[in-house]
Amino acid sequence: MKRALIRIALVLLGLGLLGVAAVRWLNERGEDPIAVTSASAPATAELIARGAYLARAGNCMGCHTVQGGAAWAGGRGVPTPFGTIYAPNLTPDPATGIGEWSPAEFWRALHNGRARDGRLLYPAFPYPNYTRITRDDSDAIHAFLRNLPPVVQANKPHELSFPFDQQAALAVWRALYFRAAEPARPEVDIARGPEWLRGAYLVEGLGHCNACHASRNALGATRNTLDLAGGLIPVQNWYAPSLTSPDEASVAAWDLEQIAELMRTGITASGAVLGPMREVVAGSTQHLTEPDLRAMAVYLKALPQSPAAPVPAEATAGAAPDGPGAKLYAQHCVQCHGEQGEGVPRVYPALAGSRAVTMRMPVNLVNIVLEGGFPPSTAGNPRPYGMPPFATLLSDAEVAQLLSHLRGSWGNRAAPVSALDVAQLRRR
């Protein structure tokens, strides 16, 4: 009996050691050793300007600048279901920033998700997408950051619950869900053309669009960086709509200029950008060149499309034209959005035929009514019109009645919203 127990213990120990070895190998595959080098060579003005543009394309400053704080000095908290992760200081201060980082160490952080001291980085920093960035572009971003004014600001420690605060747990997650990108092989997709290739690079890599526009499993992982089928943004409780669904935010039927216009100005004749996407347009896409905006439009327009969803049975009857929701609409909404929900192009979005209104998940609609909101202020739309919040003016039942009216009027056919739906979102 004793010998049997010893054998079992040895087998379990061996399996444990094999597991540890496998996790370590999976975390280190594809990593090149960091050579000990002297200080980086002075960067050219052209390289710094290119790096500044690429950092804009990645919207890096959006996370690495706390509101009211020094630009690029970190400190902004990124809320996750597992706790808060704080973005680090990216200025070239040698003690608290990246002043001592070499181009190779910076590349390893983007490509392999590993810090200068070898620690594994949390994927709130979207290295699962940034792993697609080329070494040349990584070096350009590094040159730009190294030439910022240094700011002395210590990095805040993350506030994560156990076991998510442990490197071992992060190593297991990475073994399951992360793999560094292989060297790019443009010839594989050469038939799609250079615009599509550039658009794919911006959307899948620098733009890290699927960090929001994809669903996540219980451990916070997306299916892959190509997944743009929509998902609820953790903690923020905004739904990033599917870019592959004609019922949500697919642009397959749009012309290229209309797609580019939305990313450039935040508004088109068909609607406006609100919620978390507002920050993306304000901080990133409005600054992109016209060729890059067109390339992204080409890629997004060509995404494989999912089939349209059937109309919910409870929505086929439509909204009562004299019900409580109609009266609330006449009292609070008609002046801007019109008698027939027609809106004013590029000023107040139309509600009739709006996918934002009829989307299966009403979470964004509830948020907009409760919190209000403005499209981003951009060079193409510097003084956007917005919507006031109604959280203190309308009850949960009234918000539900109003939204149910919108979702069943003027040809819209979507399931009604319940007061419970509103109450749950209001509490969050």
Image: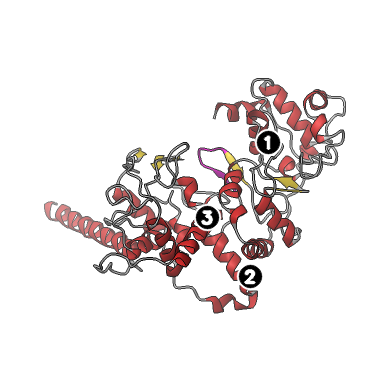
Q: Is residue 233 visible?
A: yes
Query: Residue at the spot x=60%, y=43% of the render?
Result: 239
Considering the numbered disc 3 on the image, is that residue within a helix, a strand or a loop? helix
SS at circle 2: helix
Disc 2 target residue: 195
Specify which label sits upstream in the sequence, 1 or 3: 3
Residue 350: x and y in percent read 79, 41
**Residue at mark 1 to residue at mark 3: CA–CA distance:** 29 Å
Give the residue type that dot 1 points to: Leu
Magenta residue span? 231-237
Spot occupied by residue 92 in the image (x, y as percentages of width and height): 34, 53
Q: Relative to 109, is 261 on the left or the right? A: right
Residue that lies at the very extreme toward the left in this rendered image: 2
What amino acid type should be assigned to the residue bearing mark 2?
Answer: Glu
Question: In the rendered image, which residue does mark 1 sit on?
Answer: 365
Q: Residue at x 80, y 33 (%)?
A: 336
What amino acid type should be assigned to the residue bearing mark 3?
Answer: Arg
Seen at 14% across and 54% down, the residue is 6
- The x and y percentages for residue 304 are 66, 63
- Which residue is identified by label 3? 56
Count of marks, rendered view: 3
Determine if residue 229 is in view.
no
Q: CA distance from mark 1 to mark 2?
A: 34 Å
Between 5 and 190, the one lying in front of the other is 190
